[in-house]
Image: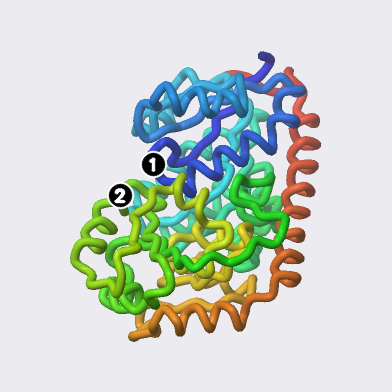
């Protein structure tokens, strides 16, 4: 292969949303990267299993893996990597920790010198607090080749704080290609409500809500991160349900059963995206800005933590069905896909601009 690229993110950590972004990137950009002779090195949280490696190599054969470690920003083996791709998520934020923000900034910064190019695609920004961290973020963004925002709020923030940065409105990376849960034909709604929940958001209110599901409906409790499984199993044990049709699902089973469900209530961002593509009415729960932004953009209801109170399952279903308009949401999804196509064409043109002789080692 003529060139190497690093794919930066929190992959391989049993986080369905992050791994879905990576898989979508590999499927959508293979036709751009392979003709340019580019091989990929993907950052992973832990050593990938053989099954995980085989799954990703089926999508993109020329792929290898490297651990997310404190040494990554200074690793000499990356001196010959000509491109950096950050295919989605919210890498630049310090709500998790300042260390996380500085780590990603240091890696991205290495690809903004000596003719190399960093592409931050389908990104959300923030929250970033503290003047020092804001200034560091602005300096790095000003030097990258392209920043595409998954929502209008992120785009406005970048254009205000790093006006030198080349920017474009995109959407979440999941819209870059068809997904297994995408429904093209009308599906008769099943009598099942799925709740994609996480520990510590609105636990008491959600326990009341899921216990109010009518006896005529089944309940699915979906863990979109492995860390959610223990909480949902405990919830299943301690909650008094009006019937026994309650199942705890992992992410893969959630994706398989989602199409045709009557309602998806999600505290996970990619649970909402999956519901939209599966043509299932949905309700967002929580204070996370990306949850609120997505529901506002798509015209669907959401509840911040303090506003949920004691809404019954029938209340949520009624609100979601009242707001749901399949034609409107299909048009929104089509617009999101179109932005991804425009982004792919722009990335391809920027890759072609960089001649092999333009890159030298650190």
Q: Is residue 117 above or below residue 142?
A: above
Q: Nearer the viewer, residue 88 or 266?
A: 266
Q: x%, y% of residue 307?
A: 39, 85
Q: Is residue 157 visible?
A: no
Colour mapping used in the image: rainbow
User: Which structural element holds mark 2?
Assistant: loop
Q: x%, y% of residue 172?
A: 61, 54
- Quadrant where the image shows the N terminus: top right
Q: Is residue 278 above or below residue 112?
A: below
Q: Which residue is mark 2?
A: 227
For residue 219, which numbered disc appears in the image? none
Question: Residue drawn at (50%, 30%), measured in percent from left and top?
Answer: 42
Instruction: Give the CA separation, mark 2 to mark 1.
Output: 8 Å
Question: Residue drawn at (45%, 43%), measured in percent from left and top?
Answer: 104
- Numbered marks: total: 2
- CB of mark 2 within 8 Å of CB of mark 1? yes
Query: In the rendered view, does 272 fall on the left or right side of 312?
Result: right
Query: In the rendered view, does 329 fall on the left or right side of 197?
Result: right
Q: Nearer the viewer, residue 317 or 283?
A: 317
Q: x%, y% of residue 199?
A: 29, 62
Q: x%, y% of residue 286?
A: 41, 71
Question: Residue drawn at (70%, 62%), measured in percent from left and top?
Answer: 186
Would you call the spot at circle 1 few (<14 residues within 10 Å), some (14-19), or many (20 or more)?
A: some
Q: Quadrant of residue 328?
A: bottom right
Q: Which residue is mark 1?
A: 14
Q: Nearer the viewer, residue 290 or 49?
A: 49
Query: In the rendered view, does 215 fall on the left or right side of 23?
Result: left
User: Which structural element holds mark 1?
Assistant: loop
Of the numbered discs 2 and 1, the one sitting upstream in the chain is 1
Question: Residue drawn at (36%, 26%), measured in percent from left and top?
Answer: 47
- Quadrant where the image shows the C terminus: top right
Q: Is residue 79 visible?
A: yes
């Amino acid at each position: 292969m003529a060139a190497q690229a690093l794919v930066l993110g929190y992959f391989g950590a049993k986080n369905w949303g992050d791994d879905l972004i990576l898989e979508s990137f590999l499927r959508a950009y293979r036709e751009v990267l392979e003709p340019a002779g580019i091989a990929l090195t993907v950052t992973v949280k832990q050593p990938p299993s053989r099954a995980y490696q085989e799954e990703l190599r089926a999508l993109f054969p020329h792929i290898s893996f490297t651990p997310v470690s404190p040494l990554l920003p200074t690793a000499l083996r990356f001196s010959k990597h000509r491109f950096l791709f950050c295919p989605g998520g919210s890498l630049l934020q310090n709500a998790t920790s300042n260390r996380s923000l500085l780590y990603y900034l240091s890696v991205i910064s290495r690809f903004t010198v000596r003719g190399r190019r960093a592409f931050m695609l389908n990104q959300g920004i923030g929250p970033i607090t503290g003047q020092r961290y804001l200034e560091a973020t602005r300096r790095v963004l000003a030097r990258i080749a392209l920043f595409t925002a998954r929502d209008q709020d992120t785009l406005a923030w970048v254009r205000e704080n790093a006006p030198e940065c080349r920017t474009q409105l995109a959407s979440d990376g999941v819209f870059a290609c068809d997904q297994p849960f995408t429904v093209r034909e009308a599906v008769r709604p099943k009598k099942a409500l799925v709740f994609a929940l996480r520990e510590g958001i609105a636990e008491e209110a959600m326990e009341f809500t899921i216990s109010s599901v009518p006896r005529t409906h089944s309940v699915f409790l979906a863990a979109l991160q492995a860390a959610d499984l223990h909480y949902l199993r405990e919830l299943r044990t301690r909650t008094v349900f009006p019937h026994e049709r309650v199942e705890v699902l992992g992410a893969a089973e959630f994706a398989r059963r989602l199409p045709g469900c009557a309602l998806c209530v999600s505290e996970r961002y990619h649970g909402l995206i999956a519901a939209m593509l599966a043509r299932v009415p949905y309700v967002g729960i929580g204070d996370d800005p990306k949850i609120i932004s997505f529901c506002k953009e798509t015209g669907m209801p959401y509840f911040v933590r303090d506003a949920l109170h004691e809404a019954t399952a029938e209340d949520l279903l009624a609100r979601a069905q009242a707001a749901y308009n399949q034609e409107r949401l299909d048009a929104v999804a089509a617009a999101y896909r179109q932005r991804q196509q425009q982004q792919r064409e722009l990335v391809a043109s920027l890759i072609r601009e960089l001649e092999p002789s333009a890159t030298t080692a650190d």
